[in-house]
Amino acid sequence: MREKPPTDRVIQVHHKGEIGSGVDGILRLIELASHDGELGTMLNAMCDQVAAITGVPIASVYVAEDEALVMRGNYGFEPSALGTTLAVGEGITGLVAECMRPISASNAATEASYKAVPGLDEDRYPVFVGVPLISGGSAVGVLVLQREAEPFAVKEVTLATALGAPITLAIERRRMSALRSARLHGKGHGGGVVLGRAGVVPTTTALTWQATSPTDIDRALGRIRDDMGRAVKRLKHAEDPRVGAALDRVALGLIDERLREKLIEGAMGPNGLRSVAKEYARAQHRLGTEPGEEDRGAEIEELCVLVGITADTRASVRPGSIWIADRIGAVIAIGAVARGAGAIVTSSGATPAALAILAAAALPIVTEVPGLFGWARPGDLLALDATSGTVLVQPAPTDLDKLRRARDEGIGVTDDASG
């Protein structure tokens, strides 16, 4: 008879507080590194966590700025200490950045490289350790810990170095965001200020998802039918006849058995849903479109895109995200309404039916934004003002504060939002 495995091999989930506040503090530090917001605010919060983890009374973060080191985060000193500046190589902190190695001292004031900073009252905390925050082969800052007595042991220096990793990430994330910050302008519709993450609506040629069985298509179509139910509820009071007509056309497409068969055949083939979209586009081109009619081939193309982003778990469009697309028609507009998109931005335009749908749902949209895909990427933070037609990509913290106030107060964003 097989013996039962020993109970000490059972997988155990360690919940908050169960294995000590230090681990919880490290997880919180990692979480803070991914937050958006003003860098100084984030670094102050991270210094609080570092101090709690290490048990030191003083924790500071100096950030490399224009060949200098500027204290941007601190726990323990007076708020006036923030902004303290040292040259690289100046003082022990500057030496850490220069040699890019951890440095500790049992009595910092007695070291030849020590430099007293007026107003910090550092003499009370002579025991010092500084670890470099390194990225791309250079120091982007220095983490400094100080206390009254007992030199830092090797294991404490190791811990401080490890704690520097999420701080480095926080600094670099904001630097990369600043490099890609952009203010774009287009044509606003509907008004309103929206903040959200970018979700990309792919073109048919960019669809990469392939089905593994007919069930994949049936499951996606089922979800879209459920979405249609939500869209109908949200748009039931729309007065524009184009809204009802678009809902009817999409509903008919979803019960079209011939289209379902083509979707299954195409999605399981080497070219995926792209082949179905191209076939309908060619057919529409041959048959032509009457003036005032919606382009049926384009709507089938959009339905293929909607099926793809519904079935593909890697798709970046999410509830609350700002959908960005080259151009949208009625099908994508209905999908955005049904799935709770925060807003829509397009690099070219939107069909009249799409604009009517979005207006009925009070969903903001900015169209004709040049350079949109040159700046915005999936997951980027976007700020959109559908009154002025302004789109900010990876907005600076000062812009974010003004945009949030504008959103809360229900006013538009002007071109001086960058302060």
Image (spheres, rainbow, N blue to C red):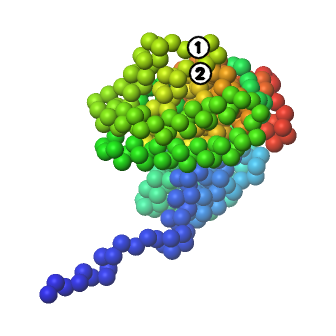
Three-letter amino acid code of the residue under disc 1: Glu
Q: Quadrant of residue 183?
A: top right
Mark 2 vs mark 1, CA separation in Å: 8 Å
For label 2, the SS is loop
Question: Residue at left 77%, top 46%?
Answer: 80
Q: Which mark is residue 175?
A: none
**Residue 237, image quadrant:** top right
287 lies left or right of 121: left
Dot 1 corresponds to which residue?
A: 290
Query: Residue at the location (52% across, 43% down)?
Result: 224
Q: Which residue is mark 2?
A: 294
Q: Judge from the rendering whether residue 181 lies leftward or rightward of residue 299; answer left or right.
A: right
The one of 220 and 14 positioned closer to us in this rendering:
220
On-image quarter of the C terminus: top right
- Could you classify mark 1 by the number of other residues whose Cα lies within 10 Å: few (under 14), some (14-19), or many (20 or more)? few
Q: Which residue is painted at 36% across and 48% down in the image? A: 215
Residue at 19% x, 85% y: name it. 3
User: As drawn, which residue projects farthest toward the left?
Assistant: 1
Number of labels in the image equals 2
Side (left or right) of 273 relative to 391 = left
Is residue 337 shown above or below 372?
A: below
Q: Is residue 1 left or right of residue 93?
A: left
Viewer-closest of 232 and 89: 232
Image coordinates for residue 66, horizontal then vertical, percent:
61, 27
User: Of 148 and 260, which appears nearest the observer?
Assistant: 260
Q: Count neighbours of disc 2 (C-alpha within 10 A) and say few if under 14, some if 14 to 19, many if 20 or more.
A: some
Name the spot of residue 40 as percent of width and height, x first. 68, 43
